[in-house]
Image (cartoon, helix red, strand yellow):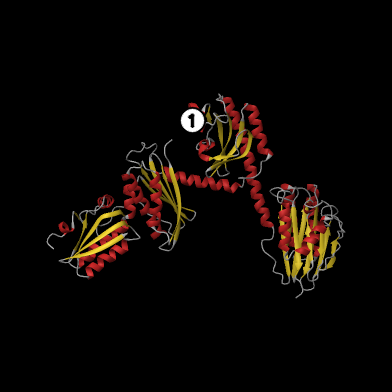
Amino acid sequence: MDITVVHHPFGVAEVTVGGRLNMVTAARMREAIEQAVDANHPNVAVDLSQVVFLDSSGLGALVAGLKAVRASGGDLRLVRPAEQAQLVLELTNMGSVLQSFDSVGAAFPHA
Amino acid sequence: MPEVVSRSFRLHCPPDTVDTLQDLLATIWAQTPHLDPADRMAAELSIVELAANVMEHSNNGAPVSFTISIVVYDDRIEATATDEGAVDHVDLRDRAMPDQYAERGRGLPIMQALSDSVEHRRIEGFNHWTVVRGRRHGGAPPRKAMPSISIAGVIDEMARQRALDDMGILDTPPEERFDRVTRLARQFFGVETAAVNLIDGDRQWAKAVSGIGPVEMPRDESMCTVTIQGDGPLVVPELTADPAHAHKMVPGLINFYAGFPLYAPGGERIGAFCVYDSQPRHFSARETEMLRDLAGWVQQELTVSQELSRASEVQQGLLPQQLLSLPGWKTAGVCIPARAVGGDFYDWYPVGEGAALTLADAMGKGIAAAIIAATVRAVLRSAARFGDVAGAVDAASAALTVDLDNAGVFVTAFHSRLDMDSGVLSYVDAGHGLSIVARADGSSQRLRSTAPPLGVDPETEWQVQTVQLDPGDTLIVVSDGVLDLYDGTLHSLDNLVTLALLAQDPWEIIEAIRARARGASSDDVTVLIVRRDDAD
């Protein structure tokens, strides 16, 4: 898994994940989100366009991240989930909680 | 032929992870280019969830090893995982998706949502998981009901294989009692081949084959593997005329087949008795009945094998299971019956400040001799606790004479008691006469028999003799089967003396004799050795 974090103005962090988001890599993504929160970037946009595989562990890490950012007054939103990730989100009825957008700007327009 | 891709992986976690598994899955997907991406995606997610569940929960988070097998059929994808985890209960009922803010608990619901069947069974300390997904896109229509097909099949096959393994018949040499049935069947039906075929893992192996058929072949090319799917006869007059079997026709070997299943004692179908021919052939109802009778005969022989194999285990269990704790001495023994069971035994056990050592040989071979040998052993053992050497043999003789007389057999025996401090061995030799002491200086001394065998003369006065065993001396007692491994005469004992001089340890002598006996002995081969350590 590859993971990059870009800090934008107004407390927005763009976390881009590539490869597999599974039991092996979930913890690393969760840490990246928590570090963004600690750096006063509680609005986290997770770009899943490069994720080839998402499973329940990856999903669990996204939910944990969501709870962490909301506790700091922010939110966690997804950007362009790839086909398989989209399928997992639908299958698990997570689409309403982990909302998807076409870009970071669309995810946090007023930031 | 439909494409079937099958792979098995063994994972040890740690260091293996779901990434290891996913890398392996990629090799399967590379071999199944026609698998629709949606089916592949669903299968991969289900399999990863299954593996993650095993890694995290099956052994309460402790390291766990498991085997995962994946088969891609034309109509479905099956994954079976087998682990030895301590957790033995899994509740698969009513697994709904958890609350949206839950961080855990989605694995099983995801598997169930994407699969037609998710099953778990605990069998003899193993967790068996099976996940089946019917191919939705571009696959063949499902041939049978999807749920349960797989796990039931896997477990039946495991039970079947275990039953076959337990029979101890695989890869044993040909036996006349099976060969004559196949010979008879071949002549009676006028076919080119008759065989007793056993289905072992991914191969078919013939215990008996008469005619031109192979002893071994891949299971997926075998007809008998079809026969064992049912309880009745399988008769195919012309393979090439039957789409289900046409691909198993082999020119010059098989185009007609008739077979009956054969069973293990527990009822598992382990193979088939069959006849086949390179030419199509009508097989009448009367012939089918005849084939059934011949299969019944083979079945009886198989059952006898099983009982003998049990008897053999019981008899080996009667030999000393532990080494004697005798400071300054080493003992070793072996008993190799010519058949499954035999009339020889050796025995040792501590008595007072030393040990009793016995070797006996009941006349004859096989079960009758084995029963007598077991009786002699028991009587000598119980008598040795109470009397001296002569008293024990006397008690044994008195108890056995009537039995031995009725059975019309007799028993030769060397029964002795060793005083471990002085090295004095007191013994009674009842008609045995196959004992020799190899001295440390290279000389030897035969211990002659002065009394008749047990069961010959109830009035016998048993004379106790003694021999002194000094440091470096070795006592060797054998049954007459050992002589046959050399020149068949008493000079063979000299070979054993030479062995004793060369060997550092009594077990080396045993191993040398065992190697010589391998495949060559027509009589029971039994050896008992006691050696006094060299002086420091």
Say if B197 sits above or below B123 in the image. above
- Mark 1: which amino acid? Ala
Say if B210 sits above or below B424 in the image. above
Q: Is residue B94 visible?
A: no
Q: Which residue is mark 1?
A: B246
Q: Quadrant of the C terminus of chain B?
A: bottom right
Q: Quadrant of residue A61?
A: bottom left
Which residue is most to the bottom? B536
The residue closer to the viewer here, B275 or B125, is: B275
Say if B473 sits above or below B399 in the image. below
Q: Residue at x 82, y 64 (%)?
A: B437
Q: Secondary structure at mark 1?
A: helix
- Percent of width and height locating residue B145: 38, 39
Q: Quadrant of residue B208?
A: top right
Q: Is residue B171 visible?
A: yes
Q: Chain of mark 1?
A: B
- Percent of width and height locating residue B263: 57, 40
Q: Residue at x 38, y 50 (%)?
A: B26
Q: Around disc 1, counting alpha carbons within 10 Å, would you say few (fewer than 14), some (14 to 19), or many (20 or more)? A: few
Is residue A103 found left or right of B523 in the rendered image? Answer: left
Is residue A80 found left or right of B500 in the rendered image? Answer: left
Q: Quadrant of the N terminus of chain B?
A: top left
Q: How many numbered marks appear? A: 1
- Percent of width and height locating residue B311: 66, 50
Is residue B186 found left or right of B91 in the rendered image? Answer: right
The residue closer to the viewer here, B237 or B362, is: B237
